[in-house]
Amino acid sequence: MYNLDFESAHQTFVAWEHEHPEDPLGPVSNAAAYLFAEFDRMHILESELFVDNARFEHRKSFLPDPKVRDAFEGELQKAERSADQILSKTPDDHAAMFAKVMVGGLRGDYLALVEKRNLAALTTIKNSRALAEKLVSQDPSYYDAYLAIGVENYLLSVNSAPVRWFLRLTGARTDKEEGLAKLRLTAQRGRYLAPYARLLLAGAALRYPNRDQARSLLTGLADEFPHNPLYRRELARIEQ
């Protein structure tokens, strides 16, 4: 998936679902492949969007693919049902909790980044973060779950002071340093989401700016995923 070979990713995840029909991580991973395909088609992960708030808000509009949206939501619902069934019997099943964290995070990302429905995304993202905090309080070594905490804190922290004040009134977290610290944990020790955390950290490094850090992160990603041209394009932008 990180090499943008979404068809192969779907085949892998569907095969896993057939072999492990009760495991919610299969369908939620397949949903992630649908989401990243839309991100790629709509150029959402390009650094200039994450570095410049105005450019992000006024980015070129693409119509969401309704077939992708339906397939994405179908996989999320399948994952939710499986996770809820497990949690109804074993409330502290960490894999099922993490699947629910992923469901909320992916759905929130789709609402905010694909459909530009920021307020609709906020509740979903907050709920995902709260469940992630519960999970890591029980198992601090569940490093992928820190991403949900990091994303909320960091991405919401880049808003203006009045917007941050309003977000905090709603119960959202807007602590930039806390967000970056949690993203680093996932980037360094995550099992599934480390590359995504590293890409977000590269965007943060360009925003503040720290070009050397951004260059190091993007070079590592380009070497690890040579079939993904995004990282090379971002490196070229740094050198301009």
Image (tube, grey):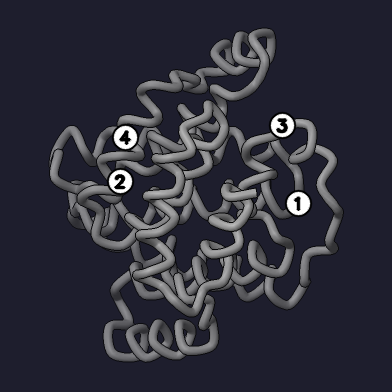
Please tell me whether mark 3 sits on a helix, a strand or a loop: helix
Earlier in the chain: of badge 4 and badge 2, it is 2
Question: Label 4 crowding class (10 Å Cα cut-off): few <14, some 14-19, many 20+?
Answer: many
Res. 129 visible in picture: yes
Mark 1 or mark 4: which is in front?
A: 4
Question: Label 1 crowding class (10 Å Cα cut-off): few <14, some 14-19, many 20+?
Answer: some
56 or 130, which is in the foreground?
56
Please tell me whether mark 2 sits on a helix, a strand or a loop: helix
Return the residue at label 3. 53
Q: Is residue 188 left or right of residue 41?
A: left
Return the residue at label 2. 145
Please tell me whether mark 4 sits on a helix, a strand or a loop: helix
Earlier in the chain: of badge 1 and badge 4, it is 1
Please tell me which residue is depicted at 40% across the width and 62% down the height of the picture. 221
Return the residue at label 4. 182
Residue 131, x across and y down, in percent: 34, 39
Q: Amino acid at mark 4?
A: Lys
Give the quarter of the image for residue 230. Answer: bottom right
| 169 in relation to 69, above or below | above
**Residue positioned most to the front:** 240
Give the quarter of the image for residue 160. Answer: top right
Return the residue at label 1. 115
Please tell me which residue is depicted at 35% across the width and 70% down the height of the picture. 224
| 28 in relation to 177, above or below | below
